[in-house]
Image: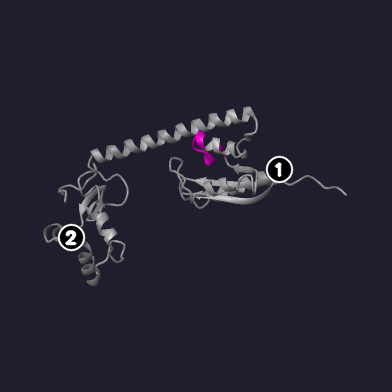
Amino acid sequence: MSTGATVRRAALYLRQSLDRPDGIELQRKRCKSLADARGWQVVATFEDNEVRASAPRGEDSAWHAMLRRIGHDFEIVIAVDLDRLVRSTKDLNTLIDLGAKLVTVDGEIDLSTADGEFRATMVAGIARFESRRASERQKRFKAAKALRGEWHGGNPPYGYRIEQDRLVPEPQELDRIQEATQRLLTLREPMHAVITDWNSSAITTRAGKNWHQTTLRSILLNRSLLGISSASAPGWEPI
């Protein structure tokens, strides 16, 4: 009776910066095809969707979930290319220390050999360089918009809306900020008195929810409204 070869266990790691319907699925198809061609059993798939290369992957990310299972549930990690899997030599060294065998669709890298480790380190270094360069370009772009007096990303601060890349006053929201400021600083009322009155009067937040002290506090301490940010609202005096 032939015992046959032991089927090797593999996991797929899929990542994309923007949520594109076909992006993750195309990666999955390509990685699964490679596993099938090698006769490997895919026992797990890890997806980090809308995770940019420059963004940190926290403990609740698919990346960390995968790291915890390497060497226990599988030995091989398959990704479309190295850039999708690691963003720095630190990430690469983590995989090396865990004894993972990394295989990419666009060219296999065997971390168990000195040559494979060297080539992977070079690729990871280039990926890190590209990530940092992209981040620097984005910062310069935002700084240039701020110097022109244009809004440069994110939700506008409470009290303002965006029109043609510029902040314009939202009268009702500004009235609430001024009311809260006067009651807190001039009349010395507690914050819960303000939010109680607003909730009782069916005045909701921008998201249509009830007010809480943390919500109002974050608005009043917003960097833009305090005049700290270069994109602070024009004409607003720090409270």
The residue shown at (31%, 40%) is 142
Amino acid type, mark 1:
Arg
Image-based side of 238 in relation to 80, left or right = left
Q: Nearer the viewer's eye, disc 1 or disc 2?
A: 2
Q: Which residue is mark 1?
A: 38
In the image, residue 190 lies in the stretch drawn in magenta: no
Q: How is the image coloured?
A: one colour
Percent position (x, y) of residue 28? 59, 49
Toward the viewer: 161 or 2? Answer: 2
Disc 2 secondary structure class: helix
The image shows residue 155, relative to residue 126, as above or below, that is below
The residue shown at (64%, 43%) is 76
- Mark 1 vs 2, N-terminal side: 1
Toward the viewer: 113 or 31? Answer: 113
Image-based side of 132 in relation to 84, left or right = left
Q: Which residue is mark 2?
A: 180
Region rendered in magenta: 81-90
In which quarter of the view is residue 179 placed?
A: bottom left
Percent position (x, y) of residue 117? 60, 30
Binning the other alpha carbons within 10 Å of mark 2 as few (below 14), some (14 to 19) or many (20 upward) gives: many
**Cα distance between the residues tagged 1 and 2:** 66 Å
Percent position (x, y) of residue 128? 47, 34
Toward the viewer: 169 or 212? Answer: 212
The residue shown at (44%, 43%) is 56
In the image, residue 86 lies in the stretch drawn in magenta: yes
Q: Which mark is residue 157?
A: none
Binning the other alpha carbons within 10 Å of mark 1 as few (below 14), some (14 to 19) or many (20 upward) gives: few
Residue found at the far left of this picture: 186
